[in-house]
Amino acid sequence: MEHGWLHSSLIYLGAAVLAVPLARWLGLGSVIGYLAAGIAIGPWGLKLVTDAETILGFAEFGVVLMLFLVGLELEPRRLWALRRPIFGWGTVQLVGSTALVATGAVLLGVDWRLATVAGLALAMSSTAIGLSVLNERNLLPTHAGQNVLSVSLFQDISAIPILALLPLLAAVPAHAEGGASAGWISAGKALVAIVAIVFGGRLLLRPALRWIAKSGTPEIFTAASLLLVVGTSALMHAVGLSMALGAFLAGVLLAESEYRRELETDLEPFKGLLLGLFFIAVGMGIDFAVVLAQPLVVLAIVLGFVALKALLLLAMARWMDVALVERPVFTILLAQGGEFGFVVLQGALAVGALSAGHSSLLVACIAISMLLTPLVLLLVDRWVAPRLARRGTASVAEIAAPQDAPIIIAGVGRYGQIIGRLIDAAGLSATVLDHSADAVEGLRRFGWKAFYGDATRLDLLRVAGAHKARVFVLAIDDVEQSVECARLVREHFPQLTLIARARNAGHYARLRELGVQHIERETLDSALMSGRSVLEAMGWQPHAARSQAQRFRRHSIELLDSMVPHMADENRLISISRQGRQQLEETWAREREQQRGETERRSGGWNAPAGPPRIDPDAPPGNTTGAD
Amino acid sequence: MTEAPGQDPHPSSTAAPPRVLVLVAHPQLEHSHITRALIDALPPVAPEDGRPTLEVRDLYRMYPDYWIDVPAEQEALARADLVVWLHPTYWYSMPPLMKLWLDEVFAFRWAYGPGGNALRGKALWLVTSTGGTHEAYRPDGHNRYFFDAFLHPHEQTAALTGMRWLPPLVLHGAHRVGSAELAEHAAVFANRIATWPGWPELADAEEPPVCSVADQDRPD
């Protein structure tokens, strides 16, 4: 780096800080912002940076981190459940797209070897853009989102055999090294590495993390998190496997560990920044010289390969029964080219399977398709999605016709569904909004007024009748979305009574600060019911157990409410919660004291009993108040 | 729990206007017509001289889960001079939440027993309605006793806690009351709340009985 690291960080950070908020303000999404920033500072923009490839190599680590974080969200059991979409649909997509693109190229008179390499490179889709977009729209848990993830994972896995096969496609056989035996050896090494990761992850990682966490130095835990991902990637790289795949595996293995949340929060900012850097590098990497030399060829290739892939994907979506409104996102995210395409092209170039000119032409095409994807998504959002929604009323509709039910329920997962059923049984009607097309489709089958839609969009809330309704039930499970929705409702529809579900104490505090009156912590009451059962199983009178649980409930809520103003200040928070525990203990001690007084009064005091006072230390306290 | 600071437990007529606390207990207020009409007839709960003179606590509304906030109830009682129990009569007695309120709020060492003087000097007024007609509450009616006979527990509760038991306001035959009669009843109720403690019959009424309980005895 000619300017030194200080200078280049100045350029990268400055470009990102300027371009991304600008893009978001224009409603274009952050990915376009990064790509535009890359083009602006790259060799074809202001020429501030010229070594795009160095940066790309570094920034690829953002993709690795992202897959690690995706892995953290997927427990092994869920991954196992996804094996069909991964291997089944993944194969259909990859083989089908390669065949279509290659056939098209051959028909146009391209040599079959070059056509196959191009087909393989162009069949890949950008995991980075795909997952970022799914995350931004909170679509990852939906049917379409899971399928995008599955196909992307399969592409990651298959990058390995593809790279191994490339030498076979070389026009001039590259120095025939190794042969079959070398292939077996490298396969063996790969197997050993995967086994090492799986067993190491199971047996060693958790004790190691526990030991590090015990040291009580937060930055060392962060360092350990990074080391974990870097180490896994290095191991995979050494045996010639995909780094991203290794990180994904490590993530899956830690998905059930107690450190999942901590790893997530530690790595999240690194992932975000490096991924941004990756997009900047892609933007810089677009070789506009190639594009300008043959603009029509580039245009034809981009339109051609995206259209062929899209056709296949639309057919797949139909076959897979992806909801109508989710099909555009599914198709567009997988129809674009992707960063693994770069890897394939680089590998092919190295073994002489294609020329440098062809390679840079294809790289430019892939990069342009990645640049266009977020733009196409925007257009589809604006023009196609509403039409699909109207057409799709038979299956799933984005809410389009104005609704006028007095109750709106946002989010009908496990929580919102119970509320909806209670309301339904009471003969009241509600308009239901959810971003999962599956859930909406299921509810519509039962005759509910359920609609597909994002409850954090003001226009959708209006159509749902938020300005006329009386009650708004906020049961969205994603904390950020829930807070955003609460903010919108408080600001624009102050007449609505907001009834909210809180995932945890922090969520509770944020809703309370927005002025939401009715908030329930989702686990409090069910846990208290179980607590009552425990007390009853230990021989308490059911009514005494109930009283104890109620007392605890009231205290817990009062304590949390007193903490809300201080949630930001952690030290103060700890002292309050310690004070709270003290108060609870004092209250209980006082109650026990009272209880003893009561027993004495019963046995002595006002009415002397015949026998000696019974003292039973294990006896549960009864009702402490009330005259006899 | 004792009186709020600065509050005279034995208010005289020269002090600030009397405070009236109305405790409403009706498990199905949405189906009630008597109790609701009486609530509607109450004067607005507005502060007078910066000090509200009327407080209405709807128990079934405040405690739908039967979990009574005892300290808050005791504070409300401490502020009041006249305590009104407004509820329909169920099985010759009060609705269950009212009874639970009584059990928990009129606590030992607070309302009775050693040091239990918090309610002394206040007045207790029962306003209730019965399904049975006036004729049913007679020795020859199907309820076999005059209605007064069912109120001995109330009277004794007042006596033990040192409260003055006021002549109850009872509406019989609640299911067949006409709208004119109901309006008249509600007007009487509102007038009594407004004129308390200047009720004519209280002028020559005797002082309430004092129950001094021997230390070794229990009240029940």
Image (cartoon, rainbow, N blue to C red):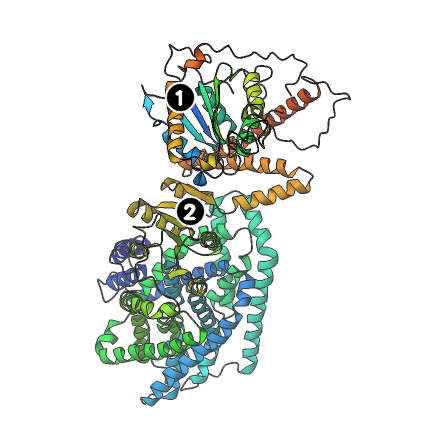
Which residue type carries mark 2?
A: Ala
Foreground disc of the pair 1, 2: 1
Which residue occupies the foreground of this view, A434 or A358? A434
* Label 1: few (<14), some (14–19) or many (≥20) C-alpha neighbours in 10 Å: some
Residue B194 in view (yes/no): yes
Name the residue at the front extreme: B140
User: Could you tell me which chain the residue with mark 2 belongs to?
Assistant: A
| Residue at image coords 39%, 79% | A312
Quadrant where the N terminus of chain A lies? bottom left
Q: Position of residue A170 (x, y in %)?
A: 42, 84
User: Could you tell me which chain the residue with mark 1 belongs to?
Assistant: B
Which residue occupies the foreground of this view, A467 or A45? A467
Distance from label 1 to label 2 (Cα)?
Answer: 44 Å
Quadrant where the C terminus of chain A lies? top right
* Corner quadrant of residue B186: top left
Which residue occupies the foreground of this view, A350 or A35? A35
Q: Are the residues under marks 1 and 2 on the same chain?
A: no
The residue beneath circle 1 is B192
Disc 1 and disc 2 in contact, CB within 8 angstroms: no
* Label 2: few (<14), some (14–19) or many (≥20) C-alpha neighbours in 10 Å: many
Q: Secondary structure at mark 2?
A: strand
Residue B107 in view (yes/no): no
Q: Secondary structure at mark 1?
A: helix
The residue beneath circle 2 is A500
